[in-house]
Image: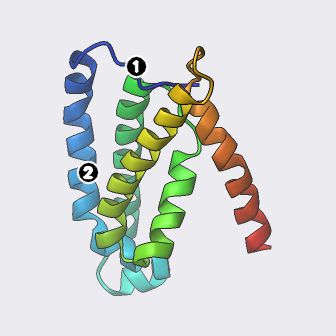
Amino acid sequence: MGDLDVAGYAPIVAALPMVVVAFLAFAWLARPLNLLSVSAEAASTRGVQVVQVQRTAFFAASLATGAAVSVGGPIGFVGIIVPHLVRLLVGSDHRLVLPASICFGAAFLVGCDVVARTAFPPIELPVGIITAVIGGPFFLWLLVKRT
């Protein structure tokens, strides 16, 4: 279920270069992603190389996800909850959504970790259980809302 018990800085430092490369790629892709959110055709007519941008975005997302999972393990639903809430708060501009998602996602995960460590005092739950308890109903709400 994943947890945030890292025994030192070595795993974090090992994952940091991949995270930095991924976030630099996302910063570079903010404008093309805004155009792609309208449609691929609209982005293409405005000079965006759609296939290249999509491949770069998938690669950057895979790199960031792999680095995060290698340190914390699989902690589900953070990637579903946080971006949707951030879009409600700051709008759909990726120049704002990406950095706000980083900050809000970190705060959300730390908050869930605090709950996981303090909910049942002698037992320390994996943080993935708390995110699943919050994320499951949120995901169902998203599905019901869209239909």
* In the image, residue 21 above or below residue 139: above
Of badges 2 and 1, the one in the foreground is 1
Residue drawn at (25%, 54%), measured in percent from left and top? 25
| Rendering quarter of residue 48 | bottom left
For label 1, the crowd category at 10 Å Cα-Cα, with few meaning under 14, some 14 to 19 and many 20 or more, is few
Tell me which numbered mark, 2 or 1, is placed earlier along the sequence.
1
**Kind of residue sitting beneath label 1:** Asp
Residue 49 vs residue 80, the one in the foreground: 80
22 left or right, relative to 78: left
Q: Which mark is residue 78?
A: none
| Rendering quarter of residue 92 | bottom left
For label 2, the crowd category at 10 Å Cα-Cα, with few meaning under 14, some 14 to 19 and many 20 or more, is some
Is the N terminus in the top left, top right, bottom left or bottom right quadrant? top right
55 left or right, relative to 114: left
Residue 16 vs residue 49, the one in the foreground: 16
Task: Tell me residue 118's x, y (percent).
Answer: 53, 28
Residue 105 vs residue 147, the one in the foreground: 105
* In the image, residue 100 above or below residue 35: above
Task: Tell me residue 61's x, y (percent).
Answer: 40, 47
Q: Which residue is mark 2?
A: 23
Q: Which residue is mark 1?
A: 5
Q: Is residue 49 visible?
A: no
Residue drawn at (27%, 19%), measured in percent from left and top? 11
Is the C terminus in the top left, top right, bottom left or bottom right quadrant? bottom right
User: In the rendered structure, are the residues bearing label 2 and label 1 in contact, judged by CB atoms less than 8 Å apart?
Assistant: no
| SS under mark 1 | loop
**Kind of residue sitting beneath label 2:** Phe
Residue drawn at (31%, 71%), measured in percent from left and top? 96
Task: Tell me residue 26's x, y (percent).
Answer: 29, 58
Residue drawn at (37%, 46%), measured in percent from left and top? 106
Q: Is residue 2 visible?
A: yes
* In the image, residue 62 above or below residue 26: above
